[in-house]
Image (cartoon, rainbow, N blue to C red):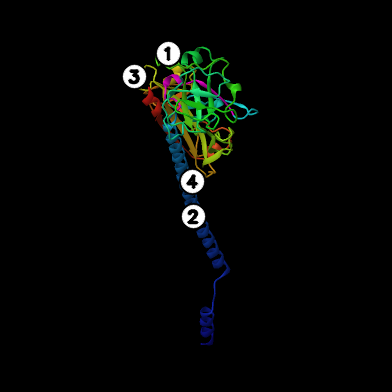
Amino acid sequence: MRNIYRTNLRLAYGGFTLIELMVGLVLGMVTVLLISQVLAVSEGKSRTVASGSSAQVNGALAMFTLQRDIQHAGYGAISSPDATGCSVKAKYGASGAQITFPLVPVAIDNGADGAADAITILQANTTGSSAPIPVTSNHAASDSSFFVESSLGVQAGDLMIVVPPSLLWETDSANWWCTMFSATDDSTTPLSKTRIPQAAGNWNQSSIMPAGQYVGSSLATQPRSYLLNMGNMVLRTYSINAGSNLQMTERSTADGSVGAGQELFSNVVNLQALYGKDTDGDGVVDAFNDTTPTTNAEWQQVVAVRIAIVARSTQFEKEEVTQSAPAWDVGTAATVSGPTTYDCNGSKCIALTVIGDADWKHYRYKVYDTIVPLRNVLWNS
């Protein structure tokens, strides 16, 4: 009877054996490991989705910004189509550097070997009239005023561009060009209905004027120069900086300087642009290429700009998730020349390389593409 009692006592107060503890510990570790792996995978996918969404937002906003600005390009600058392509010279201060830019709505600076392009946009920014102002009498570099048919809408401080007859600047560009100056108004030489003064100083530098006189005439039947009122002129450039950000730089009308680039949207790794040209005059784009026009007739063929933006996700993936360069599908409806194209699912594509990043395959990309008609060109043509 005593032995049975002792046996039951041992069973009542007995614990786990060492083997049971070890088995339980192993099972617990395996469970924790599985849960950790599930959480890691889930968190990784969550970061990928979030970074992909961020890339889509940045790309969409970058495209919207460019599209909106390009749609307004050329306002006031190409009011008369025969001025398109004229080389504009400007200089702020006697010791300032000369500035030269083409009188065109949009100019594309092609990046070398697939590097990002830069897009420069020109437009007038004035509350006054954007119509050309005919010059009624000859104007020499030493003259202090332009005599015009009407100065309606011109205010002191407005930037003006004088355009010689196209026959001169197109056939003799070494001696003739467009010149930018600033309208002035003072007691000595006041701004009047038929006179736009240009008192010496600031943007008004006679040293950049052509040696010959800007031709003027009171007769509309004769070739004559005219003025474009640019107001507070907008001349800005969009590009991709070294930090993979879409940035905008703008030339100051206050002193002619170009300020530091303003970063607009991050993780934009490539920007490509093509001129859309109507080569037969039917109002339809026949060709897209990156060849910069050199004559007035060629510039007038440019009626649209096609742009592509490559946005990158912020998430660095351990595995290579992108095996080939992002593709820009340009279709087959219009001829595309300049960049190398390849067949892609029955269409034509351009490879958009990501230069300067050895780990580019560890990111995901989204390509945004649009065609922006140049409204002011179409309206003035």
Q: In the shown orientation, is residue 205 left or right of residue 292? A: right
Q: Image height check: is 315 above or below 372?
A: below
Residue 21 visible within the image: yes
Which residue is denoted by mark 4 in the rendering? 51
Of residue 39 and residue 212, the one placed in the foreground of this image is 212
Please state the extent of the stretch shown in magenta in the rendering: 76-91
x then y, percent, for residue 101: 54, 25
Q: CA distance from mark 2 to mark 3?
A: 60 Å
x then y, percent, for residue 35: 49, 57
Sequence-first tag of 4 and 1? 4
Of residue 36 and residue 210, the one placed in the foreground of this image is 210
Q: Are discs 3 and 1 less than 8 Å apart at CB?
A: no
Residue drawn 38% across the image and 24% down it: 380
Sequence-first tag of 2 and 4? 2
Q: Is residue 86 magenta?
A: yes
> Which label was assigned to residue 39?
2
Mark 2 or 3, which is nearer the eye? 3
The amino acid on which the numbered mark 4 sits, given as a three-letter code, is Ser
Mark 3 or 4, which is nearer the eye? 3
Q: Is residue 7 magenta?
A: no
> Which label was assigned to residue 222?
1
Q: Are discs 2 and 3 less than 8 Å apart at CB?
A: no
Which residue is denoted by mark 3 in the rendering? 282
Q: In the shown orientation, is residue 67 left or right of residue 143? A: left
Sequence-first tag of 3 and 4? 4
Q: CA distance from mark 3 to mark 4?
A: 44 Å
- In the displayed orientation, state which residue is furthest to the front: 187
Sequence-first tag of 3 and 1? 1
